[in-house]
Amino acid sequence: MKYLTLDEWIDNVKSLPNNKASGPSGISYEMLKNLNEDNQSFLHAFICVCMDLNDIPDEWKKATIYPIPKPKPFFANLTNTRLITLLETPSESFHQFIK
C-alpha cells in the first residue's frame, strides 16, 4: 500500500468540494483547506500512523443521518424524505488517502 506524500495530501485537500455539510464535529472541508502547512503536516502524519496501526479514531467511525424532505408534502411520513449521511470530514479525507 502506498500513501500519499505530504504534497499530494495537500493537493488532495485543496481539491475537496466547498459548501458541503460537515459531520458531527462541525469540521468542514473549508477548514481543512485553510490549515497551515504545519497543521496539514500534522494531520498527514496522524493519518499515516492510523494506517500503520490499522486503526482509526472511534469518532471517525460515527455518522449522523438526516432526513431531507423531498419536494412534496411531508405529512410526517418518512417516505417523503431522502436520507443523507454526514461523516467526519477528516475521516472522508482519510479514505481518499490511500492510492
Image (cartoon, rainbow, N blue to C red):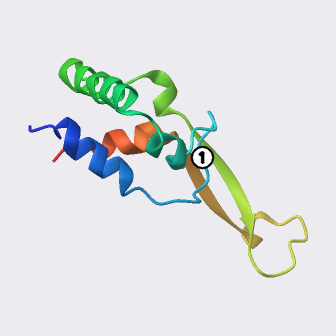
Q: Position of residue 7 (x, y in %)?
A: 21, 42
Q: Hey, which quadrant is residue 94 in on the image? A: top left
In this image, 81 relative to 92: left or right? right
Q: Which residue ends up furthest to the right in the rendered image?
A: 75
Q: Which residue ends up furthest to the bottom in the rendered image?
A: 72
Q: Hey, which quadrant is residue 75 in on the image? A: bottom right
Q: Nearer the viewer, residue 93 or 82?
A: 93
In this image, 15 relative to 27: left or right? left
| Point 88% across, 64% down: residue | 76
Mark 1 belongs to which amino acid?
Ser
Q: How many marks?
A: 1
| Point 64% across, 60% down: residue | 83
Q: Position of residue 56 (x, y in %)?
A: 36, 25
| Point 36% across, 58% down: residue | 15
Q: Which residue ends up furthest to the left in the rendered image?
A: 1
- SS class, disc 1: loop
**25 in relation to 55, above or below:** below
| Neighbours of disc 1 within 10 Å: few (<14), some (14-19), many (20+) | some
Q: Looking at the rendering, in which quadrant would you find the N terminus? A: top left
Q: Position of residue 93 (x, y in %)?
A: 37, 43
**19 in relation to 49, above or below:** below
**44 in relation to 8, above or below:** above
Q: Position of residue 70 (x, y in %)?
A: 74, 75
In this image, 61 relative to 81: left or right? left
The residue carrying mark 1 is 22
In this image, 20 relative to 68: left or right? left
Q: Nearer the viewer, residue 31 or 23?
A: 31
| Point 22% across, 17% down: residue | 53
